[in-house]
Image: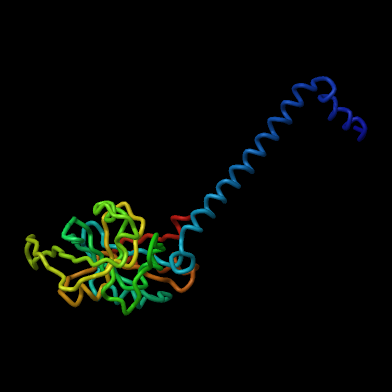
Amino acid sequence: MRAQDIFNLSIRAFRTRPTRTGLTILGMGVGFAAVVVLVGFGYGLQQIMLEKIIFGEALLSLNVSNPASKIVTLTPEKIEEISKIENVERISPLASFPGLITFQNISTNITLNGVKEDYFSLAGMKVLAGDFFKKDERDKAIISTTVLKLFNKKQEEILNQPVKFKILIAKPGTEEKEEVILPNTYFVKGVIDNPLPVVFIHLSELTSQFSFPYYDSVRVKVTQNKFLNEVQAKIIEKGFTVTALSKTVE
């Protein structure tokens, strides 16, 4: 068959059924356009998510927590083991306790978390007002927007204001709870967006008052992104639950 014949057959549909051919081309065009728009929309949403995350440390961190069965727990010894895994740069533990916060003679239930100053960047957290506490700021507290609402206060009305804390800890070998009053007064330095009534203070403020058998979670920073899966697998082998912020974004 000559090239001229092939060409004539190819364009015959345009001459005999122009409406059908036009609709087919239009449908294909709309289909391709929809794919391009959806792909672009997906990348746009991903970029928005990434912009809401503190780049670098947060995307290189793993969140390690105790399994529901508590067959293994994040004791200081286990945390030390995790810190020695190859390609782990550093770790930052979290201790959490139910408690009470008192502000202007009004008290409300909260979860009090003790963390080190580098925990916030590893967790990808941001402040809505104020700032996070530094290494030497042991008398500072970071509160959530939910705590703010419980006190019916605006952000500027509680920043730099004094607060006091009580926490409940389990008595060793029993299911009973013991109330511990933290003797120091703390000053609100920052407000974070969180749907739960949580407060953060420096971890040393808890460890200096009492001892506890294990931590609730630990943030593990990996040296490079390519080692995330490898380090995660090694921690899972130890029986712990591990999640990665970078995989959530993906």
Q: Who is closer to the viewer here, 4 or 175? A: 175
- Residue at coordinates 41% horizontally, 62% vertically from top-left? 126
Q: Is residue 227 above or below residue 128?
A: below
Which residue of the protein is positioned furthest toward the top in this rendering? Answer: 16
Q: Who is closer to the viewer here, 180 or 213? A: 180
Q: Who is closer to the viewer here, 235 or 149? A: 149
Residue 238 showing in the rendered view: no
Quadrant of residue 242 in the image? bottom left
Q: Who is closer to the viewer here, 80 or 175? A: 175
The image shows residue 234 at horizontal and vertical percentages of 37, 68
Asked whether, in this view, residue 177 is left or right of residue 77, the answer is left
Residue 53 showing in the rendered view: yes
- Residue at coordinates 93% horizontally, 32% vertically from top-left? 4
Quadrant of residue 241 in the image? bottom left
The image shows residue 231 at horizontal and vertical percentages of 40, 69
Asked whether, in this view, residue 179 is left or right of residue 162, the answer is left
- Residue at coordinates 65% horizontally, 35% vertically from top-left? 31
The image shows residue 12 at horizontal and vertical percentages of 85, 25
The image shows residue 103 at horizontal and vertical percentages of 20, 61
Q: Is residue 36 above or below residue 150?
A: above
* Coloring applied to the structure: rainbow
Asked whether, in this view, residue 114 is left or right of residue 8, the answer is left
Q: How many marks?
A: 0
Asked whether, in this view, residue 88 is left or right of residue 33, the answer is left
Of the 4 image quadrants, the one containing the N terminus is: top right
